[in-house]
Amino acid sequence: MSRTRKRRMMNQINVVPYIDVTLVLLVIFMVTAPMTNPGVVDLPKVGQTLKQSQVPPVVLTVKLNNKIELDNQPMERDQLLLAVRQALIKTPERSVVIAADKNVKYDDVIGVMDLLKQNKVDKVGLLLSPAR
C-alpha cells in the first residue's frame, strides 16, 4: 500500500527575492548618486535688487470680436505683425505682452500668441492684472 501525501498549498509570500532586488537597487543608487552633477542655481542675495528692463514692453490688447490694439491704437490682424516688427527693430530688447478683456475667448488670445511665435517674435508673454 502506498500512501499518498497531500500537498498543502503554501499561504505565505516568499519575500526573499524582493529583499534581494531592493538591496541591489540600493547599492546601485548609492554608487551612482555621487556621480550625478547637481545643477547650480544662482539665488538672489539679501537686499539685491532685481535687474529690471528699462524699456517698456509692446502691449497688444485683444478685445471682443477679435479686435486688436497695439499700444492703444486699433489695428487689423494683417497690420499687426508689421507693426510689432517695426517696434522691435527700433529696440530689439523689448518684449511683447498680450492683454485681453475678461470676456475674450482663450482661443483668440492663443491665436495672437501663436501668430507672433510662428513669425519668430521670441519674447512673448501674457499681461495679467492683479486681483482687486
Image (cartoon, rainbow, N blue to C red):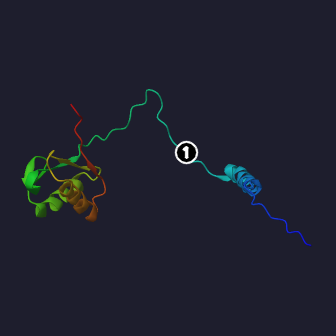
Can you tell which quarter of the image residue 86 is in?
bottom left
Q: Nearer the viewer, residue 36 or 91?
A: 36
Residue type at tag 1:
Val
The reply, left or right, for residue 67 in relation to residue 130 is left
Q: Residue at 70% across / 55% down in the picture?
A: 25
Question: Badge 1 is on which residue?
Answer: 40
Q: Nearer the viewer, residue 118 or 33?
A: 33
Image label count: 1
Q: Nearer the viewer, residue 13 or 50?
A: 13
Query: Which corner quadrant holds the N terminus?
Result: bottom right
Extreme residue in the front direction: 1
Query: Which corner quadrant holds the C terminus?
Result: top left
Location of residue 49 in the rendering, given as x and y in whole percent from the top left corner = 39, 31
Extreme residue in the top direction: 47
The reply, left or right, for residue 13 in relation to residue 56 is right
Circle 1: is it few (<14), some (14-19), or many (20+) Cα within 10 Å?
few
Location of residue 75 in the rendering, given as x and y in whole percent from the top left corner = 8, 56
Whether 40 is drawn above or below 117: the answer is above
Location of residue 90 in the rendering, given as x and y in whole percent from the top left corner = 22, 53
Q: Nearer the viewer, residue 103 or 74?
A: 103
The reply, left or right, for residue 77 in relation to residue 93 is left
Extreme residue in the bottom direction: 1
Q: Residue at 75% across / 60% down in the picture?
A: 9
Q: Residue at 12% across / 64% down in the picture?
A: 78
Q: Residue at 90% across / 72% down in the picture?
A: 2
Q: Indicate the secondary structure of the residue bearing disc 1.
A: loop
Location of residue 77 in the rendering, given as x and y in whole percent from the top left corner = 12, 61
